[in-house]
Image (cartoon, rainbow, N blue to C red):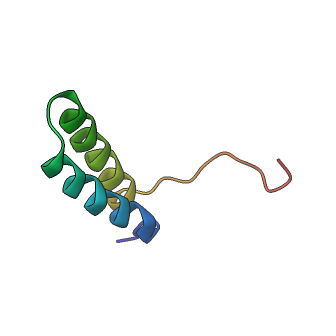
Amino acid sequence: MPRGPRLFLAMAILLVGLAVVVDGLSRVACVSAAVTCLLAYFYPRPTNRKDGK
């Protein structure tokens, strides 16, 4: 199973750690961003971007 860049996994771990520290809507934002990063890591999708832009 292909994986996305490890940066997405690192960002998800960082965001979960930040969600433990913050409170309120910031926690919700951190958790949803962490879930998005995990989805990007586990289900990478090719882009339509051309090399020449």
Residue drawn at (42%, 70%) of the image: 6
Marks counted in the figure total 0
Of residues 51 and 32, the one drawn nearer to the viewer in this rendering: 32
Question: How far from the left and from the top, in percent, is residue 43?
Answer: 36, 56
* Image side of residue 46 versus residue 18, left or right: right
* Image side of residue 31 versus residue 11, left or right: left
Question: How far from the left and from the top, in percent, is residue 41?
Answer: 37, 60
Residue drawn at (32%, 51%) of the image: 39
Identify whether 27 is placed above or below 14: above
Of residues 32 and 53, the one drawn nearer to the viewer in this rendering: 32
Of residues 43 and 12, the one drawn nearer to the viewer in this rendering: 12
Question: How far from the left and from the top, in percent, is residue 48?
Answer: 66, 45
**Quadrant of the snapshot with the N terminus:** bottom left
Where is residue 51, by image quadrant?
Answer: bottom right
Residue drawn at (20%, 57%) of the image: 17
Which residue is at the far right?
52
Which residue is at the far top?
25
Identify whether 28 is placed above or below 45: above
